Amino acid sequence: MRYSKTSSITGINKRIAQYLKANNIPPLKLAKDLKLTPSAIYVFLESPSCDVDRLWEISQKMEYNFFEELATEMNIPNPPNEKIASLENELADKNKQIDQLKEVIRIMSGK
């Protein structure tokens, strides 16, 4: 399923509330960050779903990637990072070079 910026994600509000509790962040702080009234934040946290754009804003304010948490639960792997893949290939090449140099040293030392 694809989500647009205004799609709704069900059940995430409970996770947000759990995150706040686990990190000792009062819901009123989130209310202030989101420019919501105190009653509105409690209604929000009890509601069954959250718009993607609101979740994006909360993720930024809380400095926590709720999208990654959802992807993990949905068993959606992170897309491969090109830089990491490049470094892994470079590391494999360097390890081959090290093995070759070890073999040359072994041969030259007569062992």
Image (cartoon, rainbow, N blue to C red):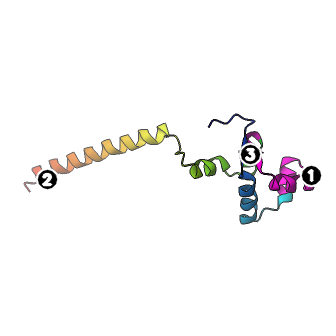
Residue 43 relative to residue 106: left or right = right
Which residue occupies 72% across, 63% down? 23
Marks 1 and 3, the one that precedes in the sequence: 1
Which amino acid lies under the numbered mark 1 shown in the image of this protein? Answer: Thr
Which residue is painted at 21% across and 47% down in the image? 101
Instruction: Measure how far apart labels 1 and 3 are at the Cα level.
Output: 17 Å
Q: Position of residue 104 (x, y in %)?
A: 15, 47
Residue type indicated by callout 2: Arg
Residue at x-position 88% and y-position 47%? 35
Q: Most prominent secondary structure in the magenta stretch?
A: helix
For residue 37, the mark is 1
What's the magenta region? 29-53
Q: Residue at label 3?
A: 55
Q: Is residue 54 magenta?
A: no
For the C terminus, which image quadrant?
bottom left
Query: For residue 28, what is the image quadrant?
Result: bottom right
Q: CA distance from mark 1 to mark 2?
A: 73 Å
Which residue was labeled with disc 2?
Answer: 106
Secondary element type, mark 2: helix
